[in-house]
């Protein structure tokens, strides 16, 4: 059913992705570079500041923080962008009968493309840092897919909330700031006592970051239960988001 | 029957819930002055149309005309009653709205075509025709926000009138652009209608309704006042307006 709908709305979907991309980059070649610059600059600053504190004890520290920034920036961009999907497109769905999640999906596709471009730079850094390529790297598709589903699910929830309450935007900005500090982007978690370390796994963003590090830096495949945890978070938010959209599908109209 | 409505009612909510933040929501809930009012935008409307019928919907502002159209197109679901629509519906609602000011005229044309359910191949084929009909040849690569409102509606109309639907819904779309364009657009509309589409038209021009429609539905504050032969209902409506 969903596939059938996607096929029917494929042209619209493509045009929406194009629109989101064009608007975001304002038609400049530099535009794409700018959006990759944000994680890279953060990486640079963190590397300069924190190598002193954590760099010596952490192997491949640059890759360690890069993996953190890579995943975190993708999560933040996709969800903050996704949050606006309903409000920004209210002019469309109040006039044309189209599935409302299509706007969120198009936003997520343009964020994903951006992420994949940064991922290429990440692998360049990995090579420069002397980490040998391993076939295990292909497993990274798994956390990326989980993250994509997670971002879509969270986007469903946030876009509905933002339509209902306009201050969701500011609250969510604060929330992502906290997520950033709690995701162990620039510090290793082994210095915490064991029970505190366990708490980090309640944070899905950390879980996905950690998957990247386990594969790339430690050349180890995470356990089966770790894979299940990744999928659980993604499907859990997708389920809640899907439920909200199903329940409020026709009520969204009243709020615009 | 192509379109059939049985006792259709739509409950609308209005009130404090719009544009408030979580903080204000909580404060108002606690103070007890969070008010949401319900009203029936469409109240117990029933009618049916056969193939080739041309229905005019008339009524003063706030009569529920646009809400009723949204129900027929499937954008809204009725709170009570049933709607049966056989065949594909093309709805032309508020043509100048829903465009993106930052995109060019060409990009907007494609986006709108996509919204209306066209395919890319179809748009590629018809694009020149659309721009020519809208008389916007020199503006193709301009940002949309630079266009005048008349130009915007003209583009909206030109894209929308390519449809070949079983059921065509027009909300005030024949009031687009200057006199010359209005004449051109009415001709185009008649072409589509003459192909045998069942058409529903919302208009404030009684003269237009009389001239085009064979059936008329008169709504007042959501309630169905009359449904029947165009001439008869139009006369009743005219008398009602005079008395006011």
Image: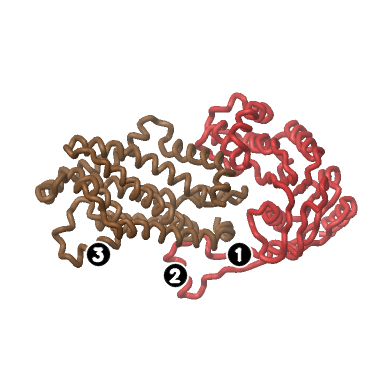
Chain colours: A brown, B red
Q: Chain of mark 1?
A: B
3D distance between C-alphas at marks 2 and 3: 31 Å
Give how far across and how far down residue B112 sits, in percent. 60, 39
- Tag 3, which secondary structure? helix
- Front position among marks 2 and 3: 3
Whole-percent x and y of residue B72?
Answer: 70, 54
Frontmost of labels 1 and 3 is 3
Residue beneath label 3, please?
A: A199
Q: Which residue is mark 1?
A: B13
Label 2 secondary element: helix
1 and 2 marks in contact (CB < 8 Å): no
Viewer-proximal residue among A118 and A38: A118
Give the image location of residue B205, x and y in percent. Answer: 79, 46
The number of numbered discs placed on residues in the rendered structure image is 3
The residue depicted at 63 percent of the width and 38 percent of the height is B118
Q: Nearer the viewer, residue A93 or A112?
A: A112
Q: Secondary structure at mark 1?
A: strand
Locate residue B237: give its quadrant.
Answer: bottom right
Tell me the crowding category of disc 3: few under 14, some 14 to 19, or many 20 or more residues within 10 angstroms, Cα based.
Answer: few
Q: Left or right: where does residue B176 sit relative to residue B101?
A: right
- The circle drawn on residue B26 is 2
Residue B239 position (above or below residue A118): below
Q: Classify B126 as above or below A221.
A: above
């Amino acid at each position: 059913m969903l596939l059938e709908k996607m096929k029917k709305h494929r042209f619209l979907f493509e045009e929406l992705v194009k629109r989101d991309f064009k608007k975001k980059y304002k038609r400049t070649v530099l535009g794409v570079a700018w959006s990759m610059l944000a994680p890279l600059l953060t990486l640079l600053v963190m590397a300069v500041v924190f190598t002193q504190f954590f760099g010596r004890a952490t192997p491949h520290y640059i890759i360690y923080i890069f993996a953190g920034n890579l995943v975190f920036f993708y999560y933040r961009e996709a969800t903050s962008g996704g949050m606006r999907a309903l409000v920004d497109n209210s002019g469309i769905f109040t006039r044309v009968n189209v599935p409302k999640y299509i706007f969120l999906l198009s936003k997520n596709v343009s964020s994903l493309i951006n992420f994949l471009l940064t991922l290429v730079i990440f692998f360049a850094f990995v090579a420069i840092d002397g980490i040998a390529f391993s076939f295990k790297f292909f497993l990274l598709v798994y956390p990326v897919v989980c993250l994509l589903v997670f971002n879509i699910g969270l986007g469903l929830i946030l876009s509905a909330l933002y339509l209902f309450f306009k201050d969701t935007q500011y609250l969510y900005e604060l929330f992502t700031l906290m997520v950033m500090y709690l995701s162990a982007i620039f510090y290793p978690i082994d210095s915490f006592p064991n029970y505190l370390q366990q708490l980090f796994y309640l944070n899905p963003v950390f879980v996905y970051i950690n998957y990247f590090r386990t594969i790339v830096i430690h050349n180890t495949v995470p356990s089966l239960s770790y894979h299940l945890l990744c999928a659980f978070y993604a499907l859990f938010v997708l389920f809640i988001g899907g439920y909200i959209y199903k329940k409020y599908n026709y009520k969204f109209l009243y709020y615009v | 029957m192509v379109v059939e409505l049985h006792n259709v009612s739509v409950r609308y909510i209005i009130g404090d819930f719009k544009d408030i933040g979580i903080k204000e929501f909580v404060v108002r809930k606690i103070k007890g002055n969070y008010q949401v009012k319900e009203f029936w935008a469409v109240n117990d409307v029933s009618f049916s149309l056969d193939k080739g019928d041309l229905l005019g919907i008339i009524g003063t502002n706030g009569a529920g005309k646009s809400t009723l159209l949204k129900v027929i197109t499937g954008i809204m679901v009725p709170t009570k009653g049933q709607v049966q629509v056989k065949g594909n519906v093309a709805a032309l609602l508020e043509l100048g709205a829903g465009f993106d000011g930052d995109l060019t005229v060409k990009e907007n044309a494609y986006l709108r075509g996509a919204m209306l359910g066209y395919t890319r191949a179809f748009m590629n084929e018809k694009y020149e025709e659309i721009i020519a009909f809208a008389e916007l040849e020199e503006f193709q690569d301009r940002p949309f926000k630079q266009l005048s409102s008349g130009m915007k509606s003209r583009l909206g109309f030109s894209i929308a009138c390519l449809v070949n639907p079983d059921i065509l819904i027009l909300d005030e779309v024949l009031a687009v652009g200057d006199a010359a364009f209005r004449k051109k657009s009415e001709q185009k509309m008649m072409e589509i209608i003459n192909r045998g589409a069942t058409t529903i038209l919302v208009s404030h021009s009684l003269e237009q309704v009389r001239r085009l429609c064979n059936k008329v539905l008169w709504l007042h504050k959501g309630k169905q006042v009359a449904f029947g032969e165009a001439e008869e209902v139009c006369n009743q409506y005219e008398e009602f307006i005079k008395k006011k």
